[in-house]
Image: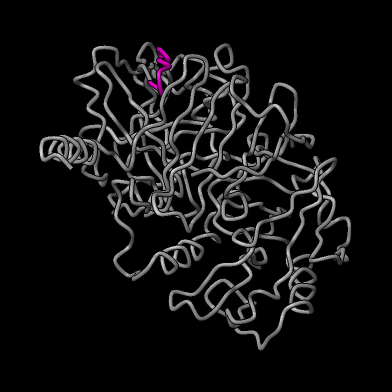
């Protein structure tokens, strides 16, 4: 080859290699709002995994141990119970959220990696001057569009769950406390500022500007609530996104762990099967679905209907949640599922952390597939959504568990490990949830 031509191609190769970004934002389309979803401990995340874990498998196993706190938090979301205001004190933050997205807040926009939570309504970020927060905070004083809300606004009543307390004509900022994750809380000032999601700029978005935290579960750069309440992203952008969003969570085995959050009806799958979206007056923010049964291999697991049925009077039933790691069933239901799985898998069986059905990986090829039966929709789980491996790689474990004994919630939770590489579409306006297989990476 001519040396000049060789040099040209070599320089072109170096240039393209240098420009390659393994963690790019999704390429914007004119009519589709897509945001990259990143696992909080993935290669594209700014957060470090816990120092106590030596491998990705260990990290996932460690995260699953936090699920009982998450279940406690979900069971507490009962509107008939009085709000609990927890005393605020300084504390350290650890990263317990599962998936984050790049969001810009303020003018000019300040980049924050905010945790996505389908079971929370409000958005909140740590703000300058925060006690106990991480080093990355939103600088509200440098945003030209930032403003705090006073105590008389309707949003303040929604955030506090209480009428505004004033003394005579003294009216101040809207201050509120909120618990999160089962063991943490924060105090914040209700505020407004612009928020940018991909190419969309949402003016005057209402969120909490955190001033103090307590506990270990507060997401370090904030949270974006994707629930169904009046303060959620869906409610504040109803004219823009028409109450529709979907996400595709990447596989835990993928290297960069990057999926997508799609907002609005444009660009959603045309061929997707739906199941009705249900709503409980006791837990109005949660996404309930009617799970009618579970199959292990070709065997329909015998489960008493009352363990799966949706009960609007008590809040019992099955929800889809982005913040729980492994799927949880009420104990009697889970025990039958586990026994059916063991009957079709070669033991001996052992326990590992939250998992009680672990076996040698040499028997993994014999493991049966599992099917979740919803009203009008069957979802056959890929094997990677059913099994999780030990850090040493010698054991495969059924990646499900029973609801903790001390959590009397009546909830079954379809968690994020079982959702990976599936497009989950929430169409709140039409009260339906769609699920379809998709390679999310």
Main SS class of the magenta portion in the image: strand
Q: In this view, does 145 lie above or below 230?
A: above
What color scheme is it? one colour
Front residue of this view, candidates 390 and 210: 390
Q: Can residue 161 be seen in this view?
A: yes
Residue 86 on image: x %, y %: 44, 46
- Which image quarter: residue 102? top left
In the displayed image of the protein, which residue is found farthest to the front? Answer: 1
Question: Is residue 202 within the magenta segment?
Answer: yes
- In this image, 108 relative to 395: left or right? left
Front residue of this view, candidates 20 and 142: 20
- In this image, 12 relative to 50: left or right? left
Q: Is residue 137 above or below residue 437?
A: above
- In this image, 176 relative to 317: left or right? left
Q: Can residue 278 be seen in this view?
A: no
Q: In this view, does 330 lie above or below 128?
A: below
Residue at image position (41%, 52%) is: 217
Residue segment shown in magenta: 196-204
Residue 8 on image: x %, y %: 15, 34
Residue at image position (68%, 40%) is: 436
Residue at image position (57%, 55%) is: 417
In the displayed image of the protein, which residue is found farthest to the bottom? Answer: 348
Q: Tell me the quarter of the image containing the N terminus.
A: top left
Question: Is residue 25 within the magenta segment?
Answer: no
Front residue of this view, candidates 39 and 180: 39
């Amino acid at each position: 080859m001519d040396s000049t031509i060789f040099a040209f191609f070599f320089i072109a190769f170096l240039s393209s290699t240098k420009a390659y970004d393994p963690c790019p934002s999704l390429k914007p389309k004119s009519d589709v709002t897509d945001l990259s979803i990143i696992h909080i401990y993935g290669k594209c995340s700014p957060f470090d995994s816990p120092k106590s874990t030596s491998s990705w498998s260990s990290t996932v196993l460690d995260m699953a141990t936090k699920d009982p706190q998450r279940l406690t938090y979900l069971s507490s979301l009962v509107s008939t119970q009085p709000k609990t205001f927890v005393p605020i004190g300084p504390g350290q933050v650890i990263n317990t959220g599962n998936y984050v997205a790049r969001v810009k807040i303020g003018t000019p926009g300040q980049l924050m990696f905010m945790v996505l939570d389908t079971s929370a309504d409000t958005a909140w970020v740590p703000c300058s001057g925060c006690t106990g927060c991480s080093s990355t905070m939103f600088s509200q004083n440098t945003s030209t569009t930032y403003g705090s809300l006073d105590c008389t606004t309707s949003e303040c009543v929604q955030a506090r769950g209480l009428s505004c307390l004033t003394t005579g004509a003294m009216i101040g900022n809207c201050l509120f406390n909120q618990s999160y994750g089962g063991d943490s809380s924060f105090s914040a000032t209700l505020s407004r500022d612009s928020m940018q999601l991909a190419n969309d700029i949402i003016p005057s978005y209402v969120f909490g500007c955190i001033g103090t935290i307590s506990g270990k579960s507060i997401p370090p750069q904030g949270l974006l609530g994707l629930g169904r309440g009046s303060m959620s992203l869906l409610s504040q952008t109803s004219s823009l996104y028409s109450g529709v969003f979907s996400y595709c969570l990447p596989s835990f085995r993928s290297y960069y762990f990057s999926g997508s959050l799609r907002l609005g009806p444009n660009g959603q799958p045309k061929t997707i099967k739906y199941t009705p979206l249900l709503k409980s007056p006791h837990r109005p923010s949660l996404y309930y679905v009617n799970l009618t049964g579970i199959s292990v291999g070709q065997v329909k697991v015998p489960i008493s209907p009352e363990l799966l049925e949706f009960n609007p009077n008590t809040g019992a039933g099955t929800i889809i949640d982005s913040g729980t790691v492994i799927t949880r069933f009420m104990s009697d239901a889970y025990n039958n599922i586990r026994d059916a799985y063991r009957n079709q898998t070669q033991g001996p069986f052992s326990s590992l952390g939250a998992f009680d059905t672990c076996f040698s990986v040499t028997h993994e090829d014999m493991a049966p597939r599992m099917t979740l039966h919803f009203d009008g929709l069957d979802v056959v789980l890929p094997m990677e959504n059913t099994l999780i491996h030990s850090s040493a790689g010698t054991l495969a474990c059924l990646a499900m568990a029973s609801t903790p004994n001390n959590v009397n919630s009546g909830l079954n939770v379809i968690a994020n490990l079982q959702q990976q590489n599936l497009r989950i579409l929430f169409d709140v306006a039409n009260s339906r949830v769609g699920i379809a297989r998709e390679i999310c990476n």
